Image: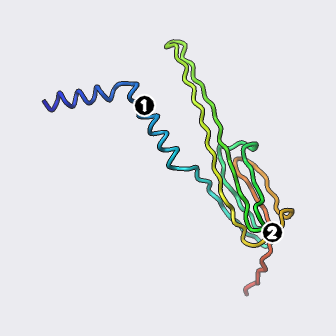
Amino acid sequence: MKKDFSHMLDSFFDDRSLKKLLYTLDEYVHRAISPIYIPIDVRETKEKYVIIAHLPNAKRENVHLQFIDNTRLLLSVVYDEQTETIDDEKKMIHRQHTYERATKSIFLPYPVHESDIQASFQDGKLIIQLPQKKTFIPIE
């Protein structure tokens, strides 16, 4: 009896349409619960304060940086991807459209004028540079 039930469960979950449904539900829950995380690195030298946002799969046209006030920037990234798979043998077309948007507030270490902020996008990294306003005291 135990074997029959186990076999019945295996055959029930082997159904491809059910697997596809479970995969779709899992993907939906994952996207709804876990937002896109944007890792940020900060580097400081005597001349500059540098903020690096790592955006490995983003395209330049989908990255936006907004000056909110003299102590805060708002980074917005949109991931918009469409994929299509055609299987002529099975006469199947699979289309998927993924749209995700992430925002992150970046708090500046001190008040900065908008004209003093420089930003560039290279190799999946948004590099934000501010003039250094801190005074470093040499230690002997």
Seen from this angle, which residue lies furthest right? 115
Give me the disc on residue 112: 2
Of residues 82 and 47, the one drawn nearer to the viewer in this rendering: 82
Distance from the alpha carbon under mark 2 to that under mark 1: 51 Å
Give me the disc on residue 21: 1
The answer to whether residue 81 is above or below residue 140 is above
Query: Relative to residue 99, is residue 20 drawn left or right?
Result: left
List x then y, in percent, for residue 91.
Answer: 52, 13
Residue 47 image-quadrant placement: bottom right
Of residues 90 and 99, the one drawn nearer to the viewer in this rendering: 99
The answer to whether residue 2 is above or below residue 128 is above
The answer to whether residue 69 is above or below residue 94 is below
Give me the disc on residue 29: none
Seen from this angle, which residue lies furthest bottom? 140
Residue under the image location 76 percent in, 70 percent down? 45
Say which quadrant the C terminus sits in: bottom right
Residue under the image location 71 percent in, 42 percent down? 59
Query: Relative to residue 55, is residue 27 drawn left or right?
Result: left
